[in-house]
Amino acid sequence: MTQDQQQKLQQIRHSLAHLTVAAAKSLWPGTCNAIGPAIDDGFYQDFDFGTHTISEKDFPKLEKRMREILKHWKPFKEWEVSVEEARKMFANNPYKLELIEDFATKGQKITVNDPGNFLDLCRGGHSDNPKEDMKHFKLLSTAGAYWRGDEKKKMLTRIYGTAFFTDEDLQKHLTMLEEAKKRDHRKLGVELDLFTFSDLVGPGLPLWTPRGTLIRNLLNDFVWELRRARGYERVTIPHITKKDLYEKSGHWDKFKNELFRITTREEHVFAMKPMNCPHHIQIFKRQPHSYREMPQRYTETTMVYRDEQTGELSGLSRVRCITQDDAHVFCRQSQIKDEFLKVWDIIDAFYKAVGFSVLDVRLSLHDPKHFEKYLGTPELWKEAEGSLRAIATERAKQFTEAPGEAAFYGPKVDFMAHDSIGRQWQVATIQLDINMPERFDLTCVNEKGENERIVMIHAAIMGSIERFVSVLIEHHAGAFPTWLAPVQVQVLPVSTKHDRSAKKLTKLLLEAGIRVHCDDANETVGYKIRKAEKQKVPYMLVIGDKEAKLTKLAVRLRGQQKTKDMMVKKFVERVTKEIEKRK
Amino acid sequence: MTQDQQQKLQQIRHSLAHLTVAAAKSLWPGTCNAIGPAIDDGFYQDFDFGTHTISEKDFPKLEKRMREILKHWKPFKEWEVSVEEARKMFANNPYKLELIEDFATKGQKITVNDPGNFLDLCRGGHSDNPKEDMKHFKLLSTAGAYWRGDEKKKMLTRIYGTAFFTDEDLQKHLTMLEEAKKRDHRKLGVELDLFTFSDLVGPGLPLWTPRGTLIRNLLNDFVWELRRARGYERVTIPHITKKDLYEKSGHWDKFKNELFRITTREEHVFAMKPMNCPHHIQIFKRQPHSYREMPQRYTETTMVYRDEQTGELSGLSRVRCITQDDAHVFCRQSQIKDEFLKVWDIIDAFYKAVGFSVLDVRLSLHDPKHFEKYLGTPELWKEAEGSLRAIATERAKQFTEAPGEAAFYGPKVDFMAHDSIGRQWQVATIQLDINMPERFDLTCVNEKGENERIVMIHAAIMGSIERFVSVLIEHHAGAFPTWLAPVQVQVLPVSTKHDRSAKKLTKLLLEAGIRVHCDDANETVGYKIRKAEKQKVPYMLVIGDKEAKLTKLAVRLRGQQKTKDMMVKKFVERVTKEIEKRK
């Protein structure tokens, strides 16, 4: 889609929020509307329905009224009004009145719009052909949302919807949403027993069960294996620090609201780390480094903490405790390219093994209009962005450039994965940091015995393990590749008289290094099969009279009804090979 | 030593604090004394020397004056005085006056003492034969200490000293202290490049270098290997929680001052975890458990945080962030013994491999005089202590019982290691918890389909990895067994013309799974040897003309002057064997 098309679609979606309001007001008089923006993939509109309770059951009625009203809509007119006029126009809507007072205080201009029969307060950006352009819409869901995102304020009803240029696009999107619902990691995570949340611990703080931890560790061990082969070394840091570290690094300013702050009994101010780089820098700085010792490649998988608002939290996608598979390479200017390409190799190898064979590449640059958001000088940025562009040009099949997407300390190369239902997720990142080395005066002693300024590379392969596991669960719909499946083989004795054989087989497979579970519960084999299917175990071995001798096995593959006869040895070979090859 | 002897030695040491005061006041008039208790292995006395600065250089003079005064000392007299009398007696000492007002406010009685010529305020417990008993003493060191341990109050001078029954015991102790100084992990930790501290991060928060992290991971991986073989599974939790969890568990009360507290931007109160059990309990409680699934054995190596006072922090021995190799076994009453013995096996195997072959065993019981310090009923405690006593009786060669040393939720078995210079360290612990299962209503569904109350076992093998590594460094004086040495073999080319051979050998050893470092710096081989010796590398291989062909090697063992000729293959076999056998 071109940028123009994107903008037009946003205007259509935003205009639909107005249409939702017009219809709701006509159905339920006294309804007040709050904000209603376009968002990724659609729009939402917040309502105060007063004494009414509106749910998804009301959508057919609401959509019908929307279509009736839409017939009479003309291109939106937008015009400016005075504070006084605005106050009169929206005298019955306390939310609009609060916004009006805000605009007045800040001296911002106030605009209203009207598509023919419905006046609303709005900044603008609407459809210029409502009747035709706005008709491919659908309301999707409701949710609670605090007025102005502040949980001390009133809880409003948010209605989500979406719209597309064509009905075909709309239907495709709705099918994708249906599929996404089935794959929702919050639902599958419980069914597969990977993680849990506790009201006593609090939202946004997942607790990982043995099976979930196993997957995390398998993924993390694999990343470490790839890194170790490239000269990385592990380091270990605490999760807190005196604020002094972040004042020096600039994080105290940049992460202000998101920092969990601690005041000790001695009244020192500490913070929980939202990032690891300043701590790793302190390890680098413990002693001078000769050029012979460069690069120094430090890696650590460790949790960082961010004070997210409760309303923003969602499953593993948005959490307060984020496990990063972080790495920092301290290297000379002349080593940047080599080190970047090494990380790139790791990313390629890793994503192939977890089932994402193609990654999109994005070169994330600074926003030239808002240079104040970044550390450092334009010269430093120009040079850094130039060297990343050269690397991306050489290595990537293709890549896009995205001004405004850089980190505050330097430009980066981001990697985007496409999941099996067509969604795009930002995953790995390699960042070039030209500013922390300045701030912390990081150097090595070069061949001439002089202190030489070095650079830093920040590189995360999974990024947030929580978010990555959520993507992975939804991508595979919980059916992980064998090497990642918490249980690889489930052995199912048909009745108690087959228990002994089943246990013997279980022991044999265990000793072959296979993660195997014997389901010896006092249940029918049909029920046991359904349980194993629900847990998406790659292989099921039903042990009845025929299999009890443990020569030939009846192997049932995940997702298949028919079993396949296989000799025990062949079966072990097959599974072992899949594990070794990470399939 | 009997308990009587222990008490007598304490009285002697405490009386010596008074003697230090008497001597200091006579040498430096105007000196005020604050508190002066007996401590493990000696005593200390806090002073306000006014305008004088007293250092260890003054000790000969001070000790001489102490001996002069001691000649005239008689058995201590102790008697009670009124507040008014006390105020008059200590009118010139603001510290004593503050204590007197405290006692008065609390309605406590005030006692003074006098060994003949020196009146002091004191609770009592002194030598009854000063002239003879107090003569085997020695002053050791000075340090700064805040009045009442409060860093907002005045910094005083603390003088440490020690005393024994005989001169022989005193000399033995002084020799041990000399040796301990050489082994001080704070000094060796820097020389071996294992960890560092940063002023920006703050005290009590060690940053682990690649070599230090390697040792941590080797130790931790070994513990995990032992646990995995016994059915343990890893879980993962965040480092924070809502305070609700600790209100329910009782930690909010028990750990009050030591909890790092966080108030979020939404003004929720969170705490950093000082323990892991309540979090692990939430994982156990995620679903009902059949008796078939019991025991559930969760383990996690994770950091806990405690708000220790700055003055109490010391190297790795006392830190604010403690890495625990923690485990919690949720099991039925009938499984306690089996599970306890499994942990005991792990402890025996682990400590043997790290060089502590004998561990003392202590059964830590509740203090019957202060039952209010514990959760639960006397009946629960009696039963729990009984079952641990039975296990200890069966398994331990011998053990002592220690009332008052239990955890607040249950009795425990503690393990004490003796290091190579005779010091004793509490290391591993196995704890039986009868109270958390009550508080959190933990059950399994038993054979009859009923909910059955279970118990918990808390088990740490190293306990705090920080503290354990400090003990390990000092025990081995940094010369770790080969399997734990960060660098196992150092290759030292004599000159640049031997670099190629040296690098070839390095690659060969690396491929054999040996941690090898080639020191190709442009330095003399003598200097390189001294560096490797300082880093306590187990094996040095000097590569000169004779060795360049890489058939026969000149192997230099750690701590030995002479080299030993060895074929490359033999050498690799020897080192590999040591690594595999954890020697």
Image: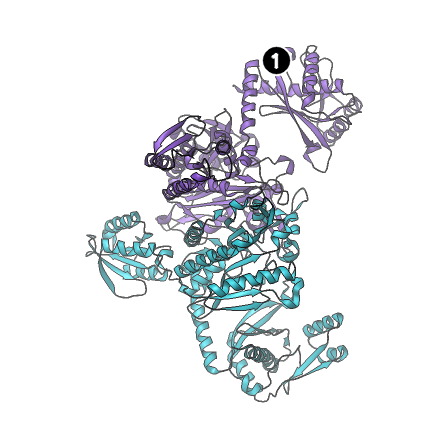
Chain colours: A cyan, B purple
| Residue B71 x, y percent position in the rendering | 68, 10
Q: Is residue B197 positioned above or below B475 on the image? A: below
Q: Which percent across, then down, holds residue A521? A: 31, 53
Residue B283 is situated, as x and y percent measured from the top left of the image, at 46, 51
User: Is B103 on the left or on the right of B327, as rendered?
Assistant: right
Q: Which residue is mark 1?
A: B133
**Residue A21 in view (yes/no):** yes
Chain under callout 1: B
Residue at 65% across / 35% down in the picture? B311
Q: Secondary structure at mark 1?
A: helix
On screen, residue A367 above or below B7: below
Judge left or right: residue B333 versus residue B123.
left
Q: Amino acid at mark 1?
A: Asp
Dot 1 surroundings within 10 Å: few (below 14), some, or many (20 or more)? some
* Residue A199 visible in this rendered orientation of the protein: no
Looking at the picture, tell me which residue is in the foreground, B127 or A154: B127
